[in-house]
Amino acid sequence: MKKIKQNRNNLSILNGEIVLEKKNIFDIFRYHGIFLFSLALLFIVLGISLAIGQYTVPFRDTFRIVFSKIFTMDNNWDNIQEAVVMNLRLPRTIAAIIIGAALALSGATYQSIFKNPMVSPDLLGVSAGASVGAATAILLSQDSAMIQLSAFAGGLIAVAITVTIPRLIRNQSTIVLVLSGIVIGSLMSSIMNIIKFVADTDTQLAEITYWMMGSFAKVSFNAMIPILPTILLPMIIILLLRYRLNVLSLGDNEAKTLGINLSTTRGIFILSSTLITASSVCLSGTIGWVGLVIPHTARMIIGSDNKRMLPIAMIFGGIFMLTIDIFCRTLTSAELMLGILTGVIGAPFFIFILFKQRRQMQ
């Protein structure tokens, strides 16, 4: 009898057939409890994000101001508070939640496809390519719309080159694809250094740094609306097909047994994850560690079943990104860049995760 299990994954192979192992009632209640608790925590952090900043707004009034646009309510707040909440904090709060969830989902998808827990959205050079595209547009003195479009194009070009290399050398194994991504990422970093060297130090270099370190300071509803479809649509596709990630994680032979077209299925997941990452970079610049740390955290708490882990990872990503943004806005008088805090918090936390999982990794 041959039986393969992957941690708490509920898929297994029994006598050459894929079977679904039933979860007990405790697992079901535990999952829904964690899901609801995470949503409640996200809601609380959202209220804190709308209330805290250089101009404080009472916590209870933040939600009333937002819901007053939908329902009729007594207005006991002033116009400045309403303008701060609706025009300044609400767009960046929504952007932080969406991008945190998107990067966490993208990272979890890459890790499942490549069966490598060290993989992140930066694997295929997406973030580096998008940064080069944005920096090139800044160097040519283009407007913000053209900068975002160039960032998106840069990310797609980097992925296209990464995917083409294995085809050219006629070796489309996972390890060759990963190595190609590392090479393209390094090439894009070198191009970025050249652009920074020739950029104007008084104007262009500061804006290029914004894209490299990430920030929600310039996010607005007008900037978000054109980009949201390229983030939300791939996220929906991944969530609808997430059960196939479980099948792919069992191995190529087992996936073929179920009639899965490996190249097509992997292509859909890679393209969707790449669109998510490139579009996120368009809005906020490069933000590291989210796609690496958050999937690990969700996997430790809920298990490796992608059907349950991916939604939890998205909520955790939103909470993490929103918390980081709150600290960036409030720790100092001048706003910190996102990349500084994600690195300071993400690196030690990732070491902690490695320590917790040392036996499993061995």
Image (cartoon, rainbow, N blue to C red):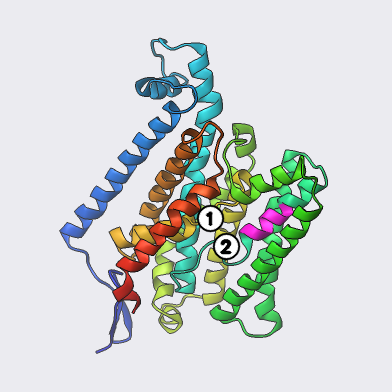
Of circles 2 and 1, which is in front? 1
Q: Is residue 66 above or below residue 229?
A: above
Q: Is residue 96 above or below residue 107?
A: above
Give the image location of residue 353, x and y in percent: 35, 63
For the image, the number of numbered tags is: 2
Give the image location of residue 238, x and y in percent: 48, 58
Q: Within 10 Å of the Cα at label 1, are there few (<14), some (14-19), or many (20+) other Cα atoms?
A: many
Is label 2 in a helix, a strand or a loop? Answer: loop
**Residue at 45% across / 24% down in the picture?**
66
Seen in the image, is 279 located left or right of residue 65? Answer: right
Give the image location of residue 104, x and y in percent: 46, 55
Front position in the image: 187 or 153:
187
Quadrant in the picture for the N terminus: bottom left
| Prevailing secondary structure of the magenta residues | helix
Quadrant in the picture for the C terminus: bottom left
Contact flag, marks 2 and 1 (Cβ < 8 Å):
yes
User: Residue flagged by tag 1: what amino acid is it?
Assistant: Gly
Magenta span: 127-133
Q: Is residue 349 above or below residue 166?
A: above
**Residue at 59% across / 36% down in the picture?**
217
Which residue has dot 2 on it? 122
Seen in the image, is 31 located left or right of residue 47? Answer: left
**Residue at 29% across / 72% down in the picture?**
7
